[in-house]
Amino acid sequence: MEFEHVKPMDIEKRSMEIIGQELAEMGISLPADKAHIIKRVIHTSADFDYAQTLTFSEDALERATDALKQGASIITDTKMAWSGINKRALENLGGQAYNFISDEDVAAIAKEKGCTRAAASIDKAANLNGPLIFAVGNAPTALIRLHELITEGKLKPALIIGVPVGFVNVVQAKELIMETDVPYIVARGRKGGSNVAAAICNALLYNLDSSRGAKKP
Amino acid sequence: MEFEHVKPMDIEKRSMEIIGQELAEMGISLPADKAHIIKRVIHTSADFDYAQTLTFSEDALERATDALKQGASIITDTKMAWSGINKRALENLGGQAYNFISDEDVAAIAKEKGCTRAAASIDKAANLNGPLIFAVGNAPTALIRLHELITEGKLKPALIIGVPVGFVNVVQAKELIMETDVPYIVARGRKGGSNVAAAICNALLYNLDSSRGAKKP
């Protein structure tokens, strides 16, 4: 089996070409304004299902762009998603990435309320200032808690990236987010993950960083 | 759409039941000694393809178990995979997880050799003492460098978890590892990822930790 001769720096470009070709062969035409996001998720998963399942609220991209330009915070539900976000690209826009899952106060809230640490970490994040982007790749309970705070009028995220993966209440939690008036990017169905959450964040960031000089995480 | 009432602590158990049921409905019967690994990868990806693509060398599980009991180091190619590994479970066995991708000396080696940082980080890891388990979820160049060091007789890993995801040289790099006499767990084809690499590490660890008292990352 022969290797393709591609320089390290050109691998991503070549990958995106292959993804574009294969989507065309499948007869799938991506919306031009969202192609960079959908292709990056396929790039991170090698799973073309996302061309069908990734669902965007009408205002998602505009609101996400505005928020990131204003130095939005990105809050993830797992350390893995946090690790995958290009912090340098985010910091270049004045933003920060947060993950509270291992914090002692979050563990205490979770114990007191009998909820997951992922849900408790949403409560902590709700106290942050400035526009908030929530990137949820694992815990449906985080989406359910977001929905509660939103319907109670206590939180108004700039964007929810709702892409948890799993078999219990994952599908339902995603649909719940799509019923709110909060801008969202959701992977309908069971699939998703911390890698998908991070890839969507990075696609949004790279689209604002025409230089792409930022080192990848 | 109704939510299933499952306590947070029981969600994983319920997920594994669903995965088992659906595999049975598909007529797929997993090898008993590997079911915990394959099911955990499906759990982390919601992708049943892995029931077909995960491939184990004959000695992989025995060698991995021996190595972990001896306090093996696990070296990942990405921070994401490192983040996903249950360090507490690993440390309970006397092992450590490493990721060198952001180290300055690795960046220097990569620049000098004109290789990827992922490949250079394999060279650094080769200097570690004790049994080594490599968990590669992203960079085919890391697998290619492992193959070089193995064939040159400079490295003898206890196990290679070869599950990079992607479109350029990923399939080939995995096949290359399967040609060595080093124990391996490989996801054939394009699919894989840092989440899959971490899930396989954790499945191996949890199988040795009957208490499962270790907190999940």
Image (tube, coloured by chain):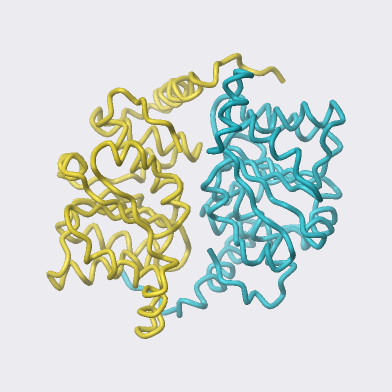
Chain colours: A yellow, B cyan
Position of residue B28 relative to residue A52, above or below, is: below
**Please, which residue is most extreme toward the bottom here?**
A112
Q: Quadrant of residue A24?
A: top left
Viewer-proximal residue among B192 and A122 = A122
The residue sitting at 44% across, 26% down in the picture is: A19
**Please, which residue is most extreme toward the left here?**
A153
Viewer-proximal residue among A177 and A65 = A65
The number of discs equals 0
Q: Quadrant of residue A79?
A: bottom left
Viewer-proximal residue among B130 and B68 = B130
The residue sitting at 35% across, 79% down in the picture is: A109
**Please, which residue is most extreme toward the top here?**
A5
Q: Viewed as shown, does residue A198 lie left or right of A91?
A: right
The residue sitting at 25% across, 31% down in the picture is: A208
Q: Quadrant of residue A87?
A: top left
- Expressed as whole percent of the image width and height from the top left, the position of residue A40 reads 40, 34
- Expressed as whole percent of the image width and height from the top left, the position of residue B156 reads 84, 39
The residue sitting at 40% across, 63% down in the picture is: A170
Q: Viewed as shown, does residue B109 lie left or right of A141?
A: right
Position of residue A15 relative to residue A204, above or below, is: above
Position of residue B87 relative to residue B161, above or below, is: below
In which quadrant of the rendered image does the N terminus of chain A lie? top right
Q: Viewed as shown, does residue A32 lie left or right of A192?
A: left
- Expressed as whole percent of the image width and height from the top left, the position of residue A5 reads 60, 14
- Expressed as whole percent of the image width and height from the top left, the position of residue A184 reads 24, 51
Position of residue A150 relative to residue A3, above or below, is: below
Viewer-proximal residue among B82 and B205 = B82
